Amino acid sequence: MSYQGWKNYETWAVNLHMRNDPGIYEYVRETAVAVSKDWKDLADEIKNFIEENVLDAAIYEIDGDRYALARDLLTGAFQAVDFDEIARGYIEDFGGDIPDRMIKDYTDTYEAAIEAGQDITVDASEPEVFVYHGDDGNEYNFKYDEATNLLLEVPPNIDPEIYILAVSQNW
């Protein structure tokens, strides 16, 4: 269930607190600039940082059988956070464009996928996005709002077909 434009309440809350804490915000900003592969790397860094510096500390404070329910609820809420969505938001905040080295990585991934029999069709007029993973037979077809939202995620300095097919390798 979405919340305030985010995937869920947990994702919204983590993002809100991260952006309102100057230390965490600066750490994530510096990490976003340093990460050279893609937003997945940033998502992993954010998740590890929050887990080590927030979740583990909170669980330590509520240790013991008496607080087992609170510990389980906190762990469940953490697992519901969409760190990919948070990472994409940070990357968009820092200019929207992606570095040239990332464009090369995406292009290399795209070319390898095409050689492996995968395909993508983007029709912005409909809008519709169709992705076919020939190696595993998976097909992804996005239409109307889903396609529009997917196309809005594409940074302005890269071809949508290259970006979407490369990113789809993680689906």
Image: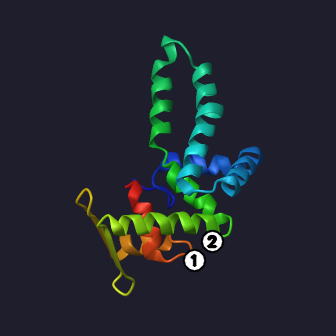
Residues 28 and 22: in front is: 28
Q: Position of residue 48 (x, y in %)?
A: 59, 38
In the picture, residue 129 is in which quadrant? bottom left
Tell me if residue 14 can be seen: yes
Viewed as shown, does residue 78 lie left or right of 135? right
Query: Which quadrant of the figure contains the C terminus?
Result: bottom left
Q: Position of residue 57 (x, y in %)?
A: 64, 26
Residues 95 and 2: in front is: 95
Tell me if residue 98 can be seen: no
Image position of 99 with respect to 19: above or below: below
Residue furthest to the top in view is 65
The structure residue drawn at horizontal position 49% and vertical position 69%, both measured from the top left corner, is 107
Q: Position of residue 137 (x, y in %)?
A: 22, 60
Residues 7 and 40: in front is: 40
Image position of 44 with respect to 125: above or below: above
What residue sits right under mark 1 in the picture? 156
Could you tell me if the residues under marks 2 and 1 are in contact, i.e. CB atoms within 8 Å? yes
Q: Residues within 10 Å of mark 2 (few under 14, many from 20)?
A: some
Viewed as shown, does residue 55 lie left or right of 135? right
Residue furthest to the left in view is 137
Tag 2: residue type? Answer: Asp
* Element at label 2: loop
What residue sits right under mark 2 in the picture? 97
Disc 2 or 1, which lies upstream in sequence? 2
Tag 1: residue type? Answer: Pro
Residues 89 and 45: in front is: 45
